[in-house]
Structure formats: structure tokens, C-alpha cells
Image: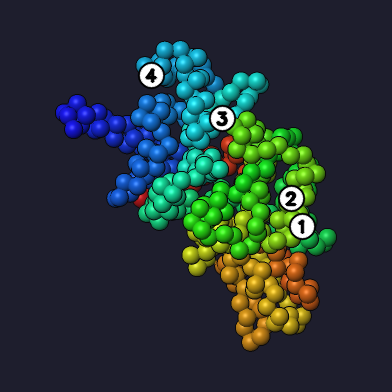
């Protein structure tokens, strides 16, 4: 390797370090590790030139003209900037949405964002680095600030008529109220497990995750998913509920997505299951409660639970509320109707939309880091 090559290699490394620091300032950051696995991920997702340009973007969406004002030293024109940014969107390394007919761009978090955008083109290299990074630093970044990007939508049949369900928790109304479009997408977590010869034990279907509005449009435009109507969406979600999948939406009243997750493939659920108190990390609004007078100890609910939240005690099932995330799957299959969902006291109301959610996460992050 020549001296020029060594200098170029060092310059490229500096660019990726700069991008990592830039991304780490956002609501869901990009913390450093001793191994440097986070730099390998950035190299996988960005060329050096793309990495440098990404440092000129924020986590909030901006127009081409706005971004160009900060990028004149890197590109010659708005047209050149748009061409490069569109290529980065197609690679799944940044966000994009259309506002009043014009594309706007933003840096994406690793998750939910860059990783999910690799659907249908996963490589073992990415999976290995993601797994290592989750263990060394990113897992804490996802759940360490007390406000989750995700919330559980309970199975509709699990909630009695006596219980008041706000619109944002009533699945049918979530679908009916979205202005569209709606996309259906393969579950990237099941794709990852299939790549490692570990097929899902809960469902054989991969088309289970949905996007709404700009998330949906991006997946449709880039060919990562397909467009469906509201009736198709409700039917797919009905099948997902039947199979016992957990509906995890973006933690906002107007969610950008609903994923249908399982406890053996989902990167989020499998991650939090390793902790003794998953409910603290996902902050659910409900938990299951079993009437010991009605329970006959058949074990159906234990088999159904994706979170290992139900155990048998003296031939009666009992819920560990520290592990229960309030999905309601156990309620719908109990033959004795011995289980109900109970609303948690002081359950937090989700932010209005994605932008408000990210602002809330960033506020909590800055508060916690300010105390250190």
C-alpha cells in the first residue's frame, strides 16, 4: 500500500467517525464501541462521499434547496445533490418523504430506519455486525431513555366493551383513519432468521408488516413492498392476530407502521426478552390478569405467550406483569375466559406523531446524559 493509499484510508476513517458522532446527536443515536463495529456498519451503508454528505442532513426532513445551502462544498448543483440523495434513499441509508410534491430528505436512525430498509436484500455481513452492535452499544441506545419507539396494540377481541379504547389503540380505526397509502412488506426479522436457516415457529408468512403514509410511499416507490387497500390491511392483520403475532406500532397516535412480531424472530422482542422486566422497556398500557377461580391450568395461555410472561403455579396460570406487554393474545384463546386485559395506572399517552415522538425521546436522552 502506497503512502497516498494510507492517507486516503485515514481520511475515509475520519469521515465515518464524523458521521457516527453526527448521528449520535439524534434521538436514537449511534454510540461508539470498543470494537468499532459501528464503523463497519456505516461503511456497509455509505461510501465515503455519501458519509460526508450525510453529515449535512438532520433527523428532520428538509428540502433539496435547504440541504444544498450546507452542501455547496460537496456538490455543484441542486440537481447533482438530488441525484446523490435519491441513490442513498434507494440504498436504504437515509429517509425520504414527499411534501407538497417535492421530495424531502433526512438522516435515518439505524433502527427503525437503515436496517429495515435493507428488506429483501439482507447479507450475512450486515446481520453479524448488527447482532454484535446490539450487544455492545445499540441495544441500550434503543431502550435506555425510558421512551420506546414502539407500542403494543392489543388484539381487539381481548378488550371488553366496558373498557374505553382510544382511537389510536383501536386497530380498525387506526386503519380506517389513515389517509393512505398503505404498504405491506416482508418482515425483515423473519428474513434474517431464514437466512440463518432458522424459520419462524409462529407463522410461515413473511408479508406481515405495514407502512402508512410516507413510510408506505417510500416502500412502494422503491419496490421494497406493495400497495394494499384498507380491507386487505384489516384481513392481513386479522390473520396475524389469529396466529398469535404481537402488533407493534410506532409509538405515536398516528403511527407510520405496524409490525406483527413474534418472540423468536423479532429483533426487538427477542432483545427485551433477555431482560427480567420487558414491560419497563416497552412501557405497555395494559397487562393480562388471570382469574384463579376460573383458570383450570390447561396451559393454553402459556403456549400462546410470546414473552414468557405466564407460568403455572400449583396448576394455575399466573401472569408476571413485569414481562407482560399487554398484547391480549392469551385473552382470545383461553377456553375458560379466565383472562382479561387491565389498563395500567398512569399509562403514558403516546405522542401525536413521529416528529413529536422523536422530540420526546431526544428530550429524555439529553436530560439523562446531562445528569452524568
- Mark 1 or mark 4, whichever is nearer to me: 4
**In the displayed structure image, the side of residue 205 where residue 15 appears, left or right:** left
Q: Are marks 1 and 4 in contact (CB under 8 Å)?
A: no
Residue drawn 77% across and 44% down? 232
Graded by Cα atoms within 10 Å as few (under 14), some (14 to 19) or many (20 or more), the crowding at tag 1 reads some
Q: Which residue is mark 3?
A: 96
Is the N terminus in the top left, top right, bottom left or bottom right quadrant? top left
- Name the element at disc 2: helix
Graded by Cα atoms within 10 Å as few (under 14), some (14 to 19) or many (20 or more), the crowding at tag 3 reads many
Residue drawn 50% across and 45% down? 122
* Image mark for residue 236: 2
User: What whole-number distance in Å separates the C-alpha atoms at marks 3 and 2?
Assistant: 26 Å
- Name the element at disc 3: strand
Q: Which residue is mark 4?
A: 74
Q: Observer-nearest residue: 352 or 222?
A: 222
Graded by Cα atoms within 10 Å as few (under 14), some (14 to 19) or many (20 or more), the crowding at tag 4 reads some
Q: Is residue 179 visible in this depiction of the protein?
A: yes
Q: Earlier in the sequence, mark 3 or mark 2?
A: 3
Furthest residue to the left?
3
Q: Which residue is mark 1?
A: 156
**In the displayed structure image, the side of residue 94 where residue 263 appears, left or right:** right
Furthest residue to the front?
197
Amino acid at each position: 500500500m502506497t503512502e497516498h493509499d494510507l492517507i486516503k484510508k485515514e481520511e475515509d476513517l475520519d469521515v465515518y467517525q464524523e458521521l457516527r458522532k453526527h448521528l449520535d446527536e439524534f434521538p436514537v443515536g449511534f454510540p461508539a464501541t470498543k470494537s468499532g463495529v459501528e464503523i463497519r456498519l456505516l461503511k456497509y451503508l455509505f461510501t465515503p462521499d455519501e458519509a460526508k454528505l450525510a453529515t449535512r442532513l438532520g433527523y428532520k426532513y428538509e428540502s433539496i434547496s435547504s440541504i444544498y445551502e450546507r452542501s455547496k462544498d460537496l456538490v455543484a448543483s441542486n440537481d447533482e445533490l438530488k441525484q446523490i440523495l435519491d441513490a442513498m434513499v434507494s440504498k436504504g441509508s437515509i429517509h425520504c418523504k414527499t411534501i407538497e410534491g417535492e421530495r424531502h430528505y433526512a438522516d435515518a436512525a439505524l433502527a427503525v430506519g437503515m436496517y429495515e430498509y435493507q428488506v429483501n436484500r439482507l447479507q450475512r455481513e450486515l446481520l453479524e455486525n448488527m447482532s454484535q452492535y446490539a450487544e455492545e452499544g445499540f441495544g441500550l441506545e434503543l431502550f435506555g431513555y425510558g421512551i420506546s419507539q414502539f407500542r403494543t396494540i392489543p388484539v381487539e377481541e381481548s378488550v371488553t366493551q366496558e373498557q374505553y379504547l382510544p382511537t389510536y389503540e383501536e386497530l380498525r380505526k387506526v386503519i380506517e383513519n389513515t389517509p393512505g397509502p398503505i404498504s405491506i412488506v416482508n418482515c425483515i426479522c423473519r428474513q434474517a432468521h431464514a437466512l440463518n436457516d432458522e424459520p419462524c415457529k409462529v407463522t410461515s408468512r413473511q408479508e406481515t408488516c405495514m407502512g402508512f403514509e410516507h413510510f408506505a410511499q417510500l416502500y412502494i416507490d422503491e419496490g421494497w413492498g406493495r400497495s394494499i387497500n384498507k380491507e386487505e390491511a384489516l384481513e392481513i392483520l386479522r390473520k396475524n392476530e389469529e396466529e398469535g403475532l404481537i402488533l407493534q406500532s410506532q409509538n405515536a397516535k398516528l403511527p407510520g407502521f405496524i409490525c406483527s412480531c413474534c418472540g423468536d424472530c423479532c429483533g426487538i422482542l427477542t432483545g427485551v426478552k433477555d431482560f427480567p422486566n420487558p414491560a419497563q422497556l416497552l412501557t405497555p398500557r395494559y397487562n393480562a390478569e388471570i382469574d384463579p377461580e376460573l383458570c383450570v391450568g390447561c396451559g393454553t395461555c402459556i403456549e400462546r405467550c410470546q414473552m414468557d410472561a405466564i407460568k403455572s403455579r400449583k396448576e394455575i396460570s399466573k401472569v408476571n406483569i413485569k414481562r407482560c406487554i399487554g398484547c391480549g393474545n392469551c385473552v382470545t384463546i383461553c377456553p375458560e375466559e379466565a383472562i382479561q386485559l387491565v389498563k395500567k395506572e398512569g399509562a403514558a399517552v403516546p405522542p401525536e406523531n413521529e416528529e413529536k415522538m422523536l422530540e420526546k425521546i431526544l428530550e429524555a436522552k439529553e436530560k439523562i446524559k446531562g445528569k452524568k
